[in-house]
Amino acid sequence: MAADAAGLERQVMAAVKASAARGDPPLLQAAEAARCAREAAASTSCGLALAEALVANLCFAHNTGAMWKLLDQAMSSRLVHPLHTLALLTPRVVPNRRQQPEAYRLYLELLGRYAVAPVYPERMERKSMLAKSIDDAMQLAHRYGCQHLDFGHAIILFVLSLVEMLIDCILDDCGLLNISTDEHDNIYTKKNTNFDGKRQLDMGDEHRELLRRKNILMSIEAVEKATASKIAQVFLRLVYLNTPENFNSLLRKLQLIGALKSKNVLPAYNLLDSLTTNVQNVISTGYQLDRSRLLGVLVSTQPCSSSAFSIFGAGKGSCWVPFDMFMENAMDGRHLHAISSVEFLTELSKTLQVLNRATWQETFQALWISGLRLVQRGPEALEGPFPHLYSRLCMLLAIIPLSIATIVKEEADKLDGGMVSAIKGELVSSLQILVQFSGLLSPPPATVHFANTAARKAAVLSDLKSGNENFYGYSKYNSPIKAVGNMLHLIVEACIARNLVDTSAYFWPGYVVPLEESSRAQESSWSSLTDGSPLMELKDALMVTPASSVAELEKLYSFAVSGSEEEKLAASKVLCGASLLRGWNIQEHVVQMVLKLLSSFLPLDSRSDRRYVQHMPMLHALILGISSVDAVHILSMYGLVPEVAAMLMPLCEIFGSLPPSDHRSCNFEEASVYSVFSSAFLSLLRLWKFHRPPIENALSRHGVFVRSELSLDFLLLLRNSRSALKNLSNVSKSSILQFDPLFQKPVYIDSFPKLRAWYFQNQACIASTLSTVYNRPNVLHVANIILKIICHKVSTCPPCVQSVNPQSTSNSSMGSPPPGVKEDICQWPTLPAWEVLEAVPFVLEAVLTACAHGRLSSRDLITGLRDLADFLPASLAAIVSYFSAEITRGIWKPVMLNGTDWPSPAAMLPVVESEINEVLALAGVNINISSRPRSVMPMLPLPIAALISLSITVKMEEFSHLHGIIGQGIEICATSSSWPSMQIIGALWSQKVRRWHDFIILACSRSPFTRDNTAVAQLIRSCFTSFLGPSVDGHSCYVANRGVTNLLGKTLDERARLVVAPGFLYMRSCQLFPDNNFVCEEILKVVIERARTLANDCSSERPAHLRSDCMTLSDASSLVEQISSLAATMLCHAGGVNLIRLLYEHILPTLLLSAGEDKLGSAGHVCSLFEGYALAYVLLWSGASIWGVGETSPAYASIYTSKRQRIVDRHLEFMAKVMEGNIVLGCGETTWRSYVLCFVGLLVDFVPAWILEVKLETLQKLASGLRKWHKGDLALSLLERGGKKAVTSVVESLL
């Protein structure tokens, strides 16, 4: 090969000399050389061979001006590839730039002319050959650590290498390269590194020395000109997006350029500034600069919090409405969450910070304000079995600080220390500015003591810091200082506890104003515990006082682990007391200790039953402690539902397999086998929709799931996947809660045969009626014994209820009872709980059938069910499950609620119906919930009547344990029956518990939305009206009351009557809507109407004297973001990830393809523009709110983000097919173009991570369609963000 190359060089030079001798111009000389190369080399590589021959002769055997002119002509006429030629020249000329200054100057001229010259190879093999030749010449793959370089990567790294080389030459020639330690130092500057630009060199005459100095300036001009080129900036941006480590190397070298100014080496300051600006523009410049032309009108690029949004919109806080709606939705205790609110709020914060183009200070401030509004909305005077104020304070003082801590840690991992302190400075600023919101900082009465304590702590420390000796030595607990605190003091303490801010916050101006107090505060009981006081003497005080530090918790935990039996029991109760509910500063540590203590009894060991019985009181206390409404909700907010389920399953298995010690009825407050089992079993069932069949109400008309109900299988799958993720070091370090490694083992339902048997029996009973033939006679015998006991207790005629499966009574296998069952009809059998539960459905079928046929009175039925529930409270789950399933079959006749056989709601029913109608009307829903004439006696189907009558008999002290089960059953019965029953149920409950009246009315107000799409549509429109203001005759009407406060309300009980804001009612009802497809279509319809209204507000067709109040196009297009944020949030909460999938794949494409009189694009040009713009924003906000804008945590991705790639790719493929003409649209062309341009532009601006996941073929089709619309810049920006796979496509489109 070397001999062939040398021979070609001689032939080329001979041909050149012969042509020059004939007097041919340089172009003809170059053509003669090319002819010679074609004869000697293959046609595909003749250009490469010619370039190598010319450069080899030029450097430096024939280093003449004529040869440089010949090379220039060959490059301009494309006889040789310019980029390849420059790649060959660079390693030869640059290292010898001082010995050959003339050659270096001519090289710089060629570099400025051809550095980003177009390339015209037609076939892929030519591109591959060119890439390989450039790589071989410049050693790019070795230098940048690449295994293989395709054409695109070879070109962009070549440009990067040239820029780095020129900068290195400038630094080297000015004596600054020796302070650079970059791993990418240019190998072409290694020679003569001792050169000092100020020192006279003895390397030639003065002319050449002057030329060398001029070359330094020319190098600056060349690199500034190259980086100013649009093509070069695109190439460098590709480097920045795909290999940021290489681009960071360039930035570090660029920082050294600033040293040239300080040393006064060069006068070319303007060029140096331009060079720096050009490289910085690579990072900051993207498609967003062209957004002003997106619609052909001015589109606002200012942040959502700017003043334009407060003129016609709903105020500055409206861009953050997803925060408020998420927090309010998290307060709905009826729906538990499988993922931590910390995880979700973290991703939502990062999403809104991007979509709103906000700083972290604005984002943190919005979080605090939304949390404060949440607390102020807390219905403190509203009583009922729902999460109360403590859960709202948990969100403000624990969940939000933990979310911010996660964000700060993620930013710290990406940035250096200075930037970390900067983001913490933004957090401090967001806290200090809260002083301006005095109305939100007023603490609720229940938190006044905590706020004053926090303020007093700050006053004491600030006073000690100032050197006041009068208070020296006093602790924060016994100090005579008194201070009035507010919610800001609690927030700051929560941040200090998590190392987000330090105690310098106590010295903020006006943070605390101390007052003298004559009496000292009493010493804390927790302080006494840490000082060594006995636990048993302090347990009552510790139960009602939350711990203030982790050290106090660890002291208590030591008693729970190694104390006496009494101390273990007391410590368990204390841990689940005030510290769990109100210890917001350390709540995550309390939760971890409680669950760690509960998991200490795992894994299940069937040979150690005695161990479980021995610790039964402690287990009983722990399970009851985490079973309250607030405790379950707090665990759900920390995303621990799967973990709690995995801990309860073994306890259910072992205690359900143990026989009770006596025949007495179970008492929840006493530790026994049945009470521990019932507590664990009912707590387990509250964590998932046990009364629903797996796919009931889950299919849309498109045949896909639209509901995301928790099931036991899903919980175990989620828990096991989390455990696998936590075994990874990088994930476990970032996890807030850590558990024992033994608990990280997978848990499967097959490991618990008794629980598994009941689980499948329960599903079978829900799916179909009980079989008339059952192959387990022991179960039927137990059922008959229970029936006999029930009949004996409630009737003087035991045979009134027919026995179970009478056809089989003559069978010999039924003749003897199972072990442990005595034929005593006065005593309950001493059987394990699982055997009793297995027989309960047959008992229920028998007694319900007997009541329906008049053989058993209603009173006796309820009394018998109550006795069964008293004997084994866990049987309530079977009762609820059976009745819920039976009501869906529609085979039971209604019964008269006459007050004799069944309780009558007549006294309260008119009042309840009137108040429900009033609540709905105030929320903007005008329907009549009662279609029954007043003269008709109220009726309910028999299963509902039995269940509601049973629930009325529950004692209030037991209701907190049973409401989660009974409440779910009543809800499913009321929503599954076609009979209007919820107001009747509400009237009956109002008669039992009058202090819950408002809670009951609120719960009943949700019932119309479970079956009436008209009510759903009215509620949706009312939400938009309350948030944006009314729309009258197609124009916006300005009103003062709007925005987040008007949407969600201030407080539920702010007046004498119950007032519910439409947004609050929507958040409490949206998961009960019967048809989420209808919800989505209705929301989109309102969005389109609002978009047309904004277009009309901008119309110039009004009379001249009315145009002064016209909205500008820029402001109107900006307000679309507020509409879209509300619409997207409503969609996400109504149907979750499955509805967003439907929106992308079915609903929105169908809307765009639909034709008709009211089709999209039929309302005029400006209206069509705004329709497409609004739909694009709704689609992007919806997806981003669920999937996030970039890479998400593994736990979040497993539930939400995993399907993003496929869904987005399908939608963009749909767009590409329409643009190719393969699909015919039904909407107007203007709407379609506006929609596509806006959506793609938003993808480029806000969620480039989504584009990375899209197939290259789809991106190329979409980019091709955009170019046909003369949107080349948008097409280029789309491909730029396609990742490494799209680099070659971008390069080819530019060259």
Image (spheres, rainbow, N blue to C red):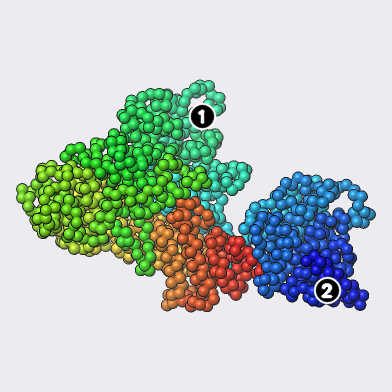
In this image, 917 relative to 188: left or right? left
Give residue 631's quadrant in the image: top left
Instruction: Please tell me whether mark 2 or mark 1 is closer to you in this view.
Output: 2
Q: Marks 2 and 1: CB-CB under 8 Å? A: no
Does label 2 or label 1 sit earlier along the sequence? 2
| Residue 155 seen in render | yes
Question: Residue 182, how many percent across, how many down?
Answer: 71, 48
Regarding mark 2 in the picture, which secondary structure is present there? helix
| Residue at (92% x, 50% y) in the render | 202
Q: In the image, which disc is placed on residue 461?
A: 1
Question: Residue 175, how many percent across, how many down?
Answer: 81, 47
Give residue 1257's quadrant in the image: bottom right
Is the N terminus in the top left, top right, bottom left or bottom right quadrant? Answer: bottom right
| Residue at (37% x, 51% y) in the render | 715
Distance (Cα) linking label 2 and label 1 = 87 Å
Q: Nearer the viewer, residue 1197 or 378?
A: 1197
Regarding mark 1 in the picture, which secondary structure is present there? helix
| Residue at (20% x, 46% y) in the render | 869
Is the C terminus in the top left, top right, bottom left or bottom right quadrant? Answer: bottom right
Q: Which amino acid type corresponds to the residue marked 1 in the rendered image?
A: Leu
Q: Which amino acid type corresponds to the residue marked 2 in the rendered image?
A: Ala
Identify residue for label 2.
33
> In the figure, 112 relative to 449: above or below?
below
Question: Residue 161, how many percent across, how many down?
Answer: 72, 58
